[in-house]
Image (cartoon, rainbow, N blue to C red):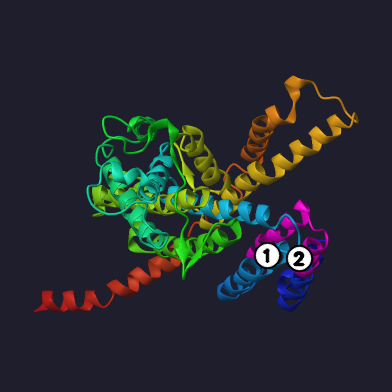
Amino acid sequence: MKKLISRLEENKKAQIILFFIYVISTSGSLMLAQKSVVAFLLLLFSLLLLYFMSLSIKLKWLIAGVILIVLLPFSASQGPAYESYMEVSTLVGIYIAMALGLNIVVGLAGLLDLGFVAFFAVGAYTYGIFATKQAANFMPFGTYPLSGESFWFFIIAGCLIAALFGVLLGIPVLRVKGDYLAIVTLGFGEIIRIVFNNLDKPINITNGAMGLSSVTPPSIFGINLVYPSQFYYVVLVILAAVIFIVRRFEYSKVGRSWKAVRENEIAAQAMGIHLVRTKLLAFAIGASFSGMMGVVFAAKQTFVDPTSFTLLESITILVMVILGGMGSVPGVILGAAVVTILNLQVLTELTDWFNQLSLNGVISIPDALSPAKMQRFIFGGLLILFALYRPQGLLPAKQSTFDLKELKEEADEEIQPVIPTAEKNVNL
């Protein structure tokens, strides 16, 4: 078996042929089965297989793009569960973007943030207030709600405002780290939620606990985007931009500064890294991704209220980062996808299946052990298993390795031309 796998790893043509057979068979199953969660998940699993294939990065991105843009929507659209599949895929994209943002703060810069969902709320309310009549309560000019075309402007606005809130959070917490930082950020997340919950007096800005309803859907070229299958493409474009930006930052001077601060702040400062600027940049960039997706979330749900931004959401996003592998972009993408699909698709389908068996009298489940009540328990158990057997995450971050001998030789080569010059000066 090991010989077969090693031969397969060396043979790119065989990998490509087997991969295409797998993708065609799973997409065909999704088309013919009309409603098959297994076929849907197997088709998504092909993206993970693609990651491990020995192909060039560009070719992998091209194939992944074809699967996500063409094959997945087309195969799912042949059955009645098309919109539910697209709903799950859209939410997976939203959570991946937020997890990538938190990965910058926690995974790269090493700043434990338990209030990350606050930036998501800021983005959602930024669009929700102006895309409903709520803005007319405190804005003396303009006509509200704004039209659906304004959605595209608010994606940028949500990004910038969330980044501003990220800086505002970062400034007072610069002197704390570790557990103290976690407590402060947790408090920030709760403060934002409580402020939105009570900001209906004396001026009604957020409509308090009642939330904002009938949020104007986005529109482009006169077409209103109201279905999950339409939001799927919006999220896909934003997610592609987020992944590109994160990858560029990861290997840039800023990314290396974040990693240096994460490993040892004193040593990083001794090497000339500006701690304040580096940390604030991590908070701002991480928050901006969450703010953008908050705008998309508000437009997709057409309803925003404070209960969508609880501490549990922050913990869930943090779990995505830890489960995937802190500091690893592919790992965080996988972790966010696994957690979201587990919560929204797998455990929900499992619960429905057990309920159906119980209703038909096949099995008898006590009310206290009802799958609907045990959903979080099962989710927690799975996370414990992952933590025990994959403590570094599903796809740990790859650390750069250096050969000390080569580094020493390179350093000697750089020093050697200087020595004769120095000796010459001494002789003179």
The residue where tag 2 is placed is 27
Do we see residue 384 in this rendering?
Answer: yes
Write down the region rendered in magenta. Answer: 23-52
Q: Quadrant of the N terminus?
A: bottom right
Q: Nearer the viewer, residue 50 or 123?
A: 123
Helix, strand or loop: magenta stretch: helix
Q: Is residue 27 magenta?
A: yes
The residue where tag 1 is placed is 72
User: What amino acid type is highlighted by mark number 1?
Assistant: Leu
Do we see residue 263 in this rendering?
Answer: no
Place of residue 148 in the rendered image (x, y in percent of width and height, measured from the top left): 42, 59
Q: Is residue 186 magenta?
A: no
Label 2: which secondary element: helix
Could you tell which of marks 1 and 2 lies nearer the N-terminus? 2
User: What amino acid type is highlighted by mark number 2?
Assistant: Ser
Q: Nearer the viewer, residue 143 or 268?
A: 143
Place of residue 428 in the rendered image (x, y in percent of width and height, measured from the top left): 8, 79
Point out the residue furthest to the right here: 362
Look at 24% across and 41% down and name the residue there: 171
Label 1: which secondary element: helix
Q: Disc 1 versus disc 2: distance between alpha carbons? A: 7 Å
Point out the residue furthest to the front here: 143
Does residue 266 appear left or right of residue 401 in this picture?
left
Compared to 176, does 21 lie above or below?
below
Place of residue 47 in the rendered image (x, y in percent of width and height, measured from the top left): 65, 62
